[in-house]
Amino acid sequence: MTVERIVSETKDQFPIGMRVLAVDDDPTCLLLLETLLRRCQYHVTTTSQAITALKMLRENKNKFDLVISDVHMPDMDGFKLLELVGLEMDLPVIMLSANGDTKLVMKGITHGACDYLLKPVRIEELKNIWQHVVRRKKFDRKVRNNSDSQDKPHADSGEAAGIGKADNSAKINKKRKDQNEDEDEDLDENGQDNDDPSAQKKPRVVWSVELHRKFVAAVNQLGIEKAVPKKILELMNVEKLTRENVASHLQKFRLYLKRISCVANQQANMAAAVGTADSSYLRMGSLNGLGNFHALAGTDQLHNAAFRSFPPSRVLGRLNTPAGLGIRGLPSPGTIQLGHVQNSGHSSNDQSKLQSFIPGNHNTNILQGMPMSLDLDQLQNNKGVSHIGELPTANRTAVFPVSGSLIDSRIAGFSNNPLLGVTSNSLMLEGSSQQANLHASNLRDGVSAAGFQNGNTLSNFASIDPVSSQLRDSKADLQGQAAPINCNAGPMIRSVPQEWSAPRKDAPYQSHLMSSSVNSSIPVNGAMVQLDQCLDRNNSIFHRTMDSDSIGPLNFVDPLSIKHSEGLNSAAMEPPVIEKEGYLMYQLRPHGNHIPDNIGSLEDLASAMMKQDQDKGKPTAGNFRHNSYSHRTCI
Amino acid sequence: MERNPLRRQLQIMRKSLFDQGYLDEQFVQLEELQDDSNPNFVEEVVTLYYRDSARLILNIEQALERKPYNFHKLDAYMHQFKGSSSSIGAKKVKAESTLFREYCKSGNGEGCMRCFQQLKKEYATLRKKLEAYFQVARQAGPMETACRPK
């Protein structure tokens, strides 16, 4: 009965033949859904496992037009999948659930779902789902049609690109826009071409690590508050990149930052006192956030964040920018400088370009190697921070997990952002175990980034997105977030205390904690969480790159970062980072003013950090030190 | 009205299922999805449902044997079960599921237990009726398009 058209015919017959991926662990519902979709003349692929779904999506990003997923699944939370898909593949995702609670629906929206359907699903509802695909494309087209000079969002209730403004609607818009980011392959520095874009999709811009790094650098330079697509575009100076591409990327980034900032808040508390006198202490706050990720894992928030591959690097990058990372109080010097940021001349962090990029082939390279290394340096010693090894861009695979964390930590420290980062990290951690595994191993290998590429990066990215948007939020938000996060982090961190061995080992921290991608990365989170607790005393922010071993889930840790660490080792990166398990421990130098115990808000942390910064690296006593971190040079 | 006696019988059975509240509108949706290329769809789905939900029923039963009750878990199982049941249009079963979840939310263990017993009864009754229905359906051959219950 159903006519299953061949993909090549879809262009002419859309919505007939629209390719849908249906995910539901309940076989009855899945069969029903499949049949309904076929009745609508869509081309349907089903799976009962979210992990399998992700794999399929990653294999070929252009294979599907739309994803429908159940919320409650045993192997992965539906929201997590939602985020990951949104970030990595930028496909519209529809959530499905028997539970129609407003809270859940809201959650779906905030995680980027373009629709939320209640079970049992009716065919009438499914008949219209194609609109989500079209809307994205159209939106994108519309955006691109606008003059480049127009930085204002296109207004609409949700369509507006909200450039420069991250807000909830922007998130959705962003998704839409992103989906339509059809830039030519030239931008695909990874050499990944979008293959056979269907008529509905044009080739997307692939945000390679390199590209993402530039992006983050530009954002950092401008300052998160002031980063508008047009200016970013100018700074980046990349051919064939349009403002719209940048705009949508920015949106994602903001979302990510927002996400991690939540976590970061918690983490911020944990800010590890960076041992190094270097002023550029890592605002590990954000890292802590990472830890929080795990902690957060428990919470829904984490969920989402966790699986996002947190683009910590990205976030960090942003944070670093003294120019004004949205993060307040980010004292520039040496503070986390995302790899690219370094260029901007921050203190000694030159080297530390942690480029944790998300290897993701597709626009995931969002996270540029986190300047984690930067932080590390700072942590370690005054020296300019031996950067964690610049993650070789080539290794894209190594994705940033670290960066994510770094960012997070940083954010936590100083601004809301960190939390976002953190949150995302945690999410990442939580994220599909797959990712985590990938990361973990990758990190070790130092580049198995490949694993990352797939999705991890994206996941990181994903997390970044939420974070970024969050970054934009007022501090108030963060504070609010921070609070809850802290709670979560609390327990989590405890679990990992041992990781926090005295930081500052020589090993360049590479592994970003960010392994948010790790699903089970709770261990990392745990560690991070601890930081949270320690934060009170030390403000040290630990940036932990989770070692695959240690942190299972953290895999995500930026393989790149890990790589760097290894590379850095030779590069004489002073490893302020604790070698343990690849945890990069960044410690905020506790200076006279320790971060108040109740560092609830980033502000506090930020200011604390600022102060610490001045101190130059007095190692904060505190649990942070215990670093069991070994920064792992994953990769 | 169906001339064929088997089909007429089928129609009567069907109507009764609706009238007595065993099935709801969702079942009609299933019927509408059945067609020549998918001639046994309804039966397939129902069979799948009973097979899969048996596992859930077992889980719940086991969970109810462990005191004190883990309401959170029970609720989660039931949520899943409810989703499945509503997908095939099992009206009474679904109602019992909802009630069970209410009891879980309020921590009423006794209520949960009682409700579950009732649910199992409804579940079994529906199964028998549907089995009989499908048997006749198979004998009667393909039906005309589904008509909505009054």
Image (spheres, rainbow, N blue to C red):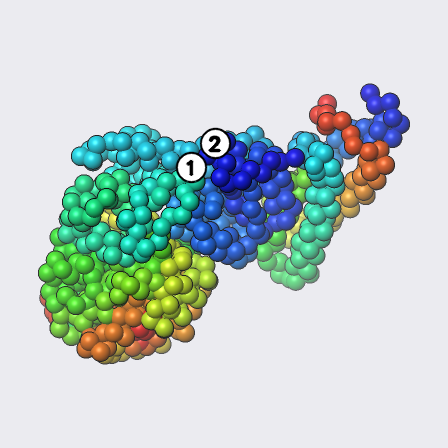
Apparent side of residue A589 relative to residue A483 in the rendered image (left or right) = left
Residue furthest top as drawn: B1
**Subunit bearing disc 1:** A
Spatial separation of the CA atoms under disc 2 and disc 1: 8 Å
x, y (%) of residue B5? 89, 27
Which sits in the foreground, B29 or A217? A217
Which sits in the foreground, A581 or B76? A581
Q: Is residue A121 above or below residue A278?
A: above
Q: Quadrant of residue A509?
A: bottom left
| Total residue callouts | 2
Give the residue drawn at x 53%, y 37%: A17
| Residue topped by disc 1 | A199
Mark sitting earlier along the chain (2/1) = 2
> Quadrant of the image for the N terminus of chain A?
top right
Give the residue drawn at x 55%, y 37%: A5
Give the residue drawn at x 73%, y 46%: B47
**Disc 1 residue type (three-letter):** Ala
> Quadrant of the image for the C terminus of chain A?
bottom left
**Subunit bearing disc 2:** A
Q: Which mark is residue A12?
A: 2
Q: Are marks 2 and 1 on the same chain?
A: yes
Are circles 2 and 1 on residues that touch, CB within 8 Å? yes
Q: Label 2, secondary structure: give it.
A: helix
x, y (%) of residue A229? 21, 42
x, y (%) of residue A596? 22, 62
**Disc 2 residue type (three-letter):** Asp
Residue A83 in view: no
Apparent side of residue A217 relative to residue A395 in the rendered image (left or right) = left
Q: Please tell me how crowded label 1 is: few (under 14), some (14-19), or many (20+) other residues with Cα within 10 Å.
A: some
x, y (%) of residue A104? 47, 43
